[in-house]
Image (cartoon, rainbow, N blue to C red):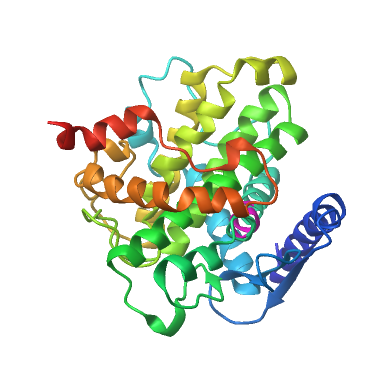
Amino acid sequence: MKDIDIYELAGNVLSSITSDLNESIYSELNGKLSLAWSPDPSVNAWAKSEGTIDEPPIHKICINYELVRQLYRDIEAFCEYLESDLDKGAFDFWFQDFEQPIEMLPSIFTSEAHRKNTFIAAITWVFFHELGHLKQEHGYIRSKFLNYQVDLISECNIEDSRLIEGKAAAIYHVTEMAADFEAVDTCISELIRHFSGEDLKAAIYLFVCGVSSTLYRFHGDKSLILDNVPGGNHPNPLTRLENIIPQIYEFLSISDLHQHIGIVLDRKRILGICNQAATAAGLFWLRCRTEKPEIPDNYFLMGNLNRANGKEYLCKIVETWDEIEPEIKALRRFGHYYGVLQFSQHTRDSIFSKRKE
């Protein structure tokens, strides 16, 4: 696909979503959602809430052309990587315990559809991630709790290149995770609306491939080692994936949902689909985008609670979320319950257990 075709595809998809949201939601709120495109050469997207929180929402999402171009090229290279069977031996070993083997690229779709569906999943997730920031008014939240003005929510750049640490980093990290949660909730709902049966399972697999690839692209070459406290403006991709994937299989395990869509989505099967997709994207990024010959320790998914420093890190995240959640719920104008960031009782008991001793 030529660059101009990538821009056209992304433009058509996101413009249609924006129009639908304006018609179905923002018009009811007397507000407006606008989509802008930027020729800035960075791989970036940003969101801005104009006006005050007491006024109808005037929201703007901006996507850089370079972002959609690079995401497509990453996905194109990822599909070529899987088609090449370069790491077939490693994948066969890692996934040998799956009761039902999962294809590295679902044969139910064509090669062209693999690329197109994964790309659409990726750019749609980015859009709804930005919308998640706006839905929960994260600019206002960051400004209020950090005592300095935050006008723009940016995926790669930070105002004045400020070194973010301490409480500021925790606020940034947890609001990014909250926006991830909103995006996954909306995207999975859209997949259920557009696909059914085996097509739905394949679409979920490609969705996780697309989101994983996107998170690695945004993170770039920065270290994936998890510190015991948040630092910088974004969590690392593994932390985000280990929060997103349980959200996906927990939602898809709801029995009432199975009755609605007419098929049963086995929890273990969905977990396997998500883990394989994220692992494949992670190894692709290591091999083909960083060209590192060796796999670092703790590189793949293992659960945030099992990762070195994971409990200490999550302790700060959960404490911060508990502090800002009431304000976010009061500000959130639309969206259902499943889009709000949640931490299970098991997670809370695990990270706070030492305090009880």
From this viewpoint, which residue is outermost toward the front? Answer: 54
Residue 261 lies, in percent from the top left, at 73, 21
Task: Specify whether 50 is left or right of 33.
Answer: left
**Residue 85 locus on image (x, y percent):** 45, 41
Quarter of the image where the N terminus is located: bottom right
- Which residue is at a point 65% across and 43% down the rendered structure image? 187
Q: Is residue 126 magenta?
A: yes
Q: Identify the magenta region.
A: 125-130
The residue shown at (32%, 42%) is 300
Q: Quadrant of the C terminus?
A: top left
Asked if residue 102 lies left or right of residue 16, the reply is left
Which residue is depicted at the point 27% across and 45% down? 315
Residue toward you, 183 or 327: 327
Q: Using the image, determine if residue 246 lies above or below residue 231.
A: above
Where residue 289 sits, quadrant-wise, is bottom left
Q: Residue furthest left?
A: 357
Q: At x 47% / y 57%, what residue is drawn?
A: 176
Work out whether residue 190 or residue 282 is closer to the camera in this orientation and state it. Answer: 190
Q: Position of residue 40 (x, y in %)?
A: 60, 82
Does residue 116 show up? yes
Q: Is residue 28 magenta?
A: no
Q: Is residue 78 visible?
A: no
Image x and y of residue 181, in percent: 53, 45
Dominant SS type (magenta): helix
Q: How many marks do you count on the picture?
A: 0
Foreground residue among 316 and 194: 316
**Left or right, 290 with reference to 353:** right
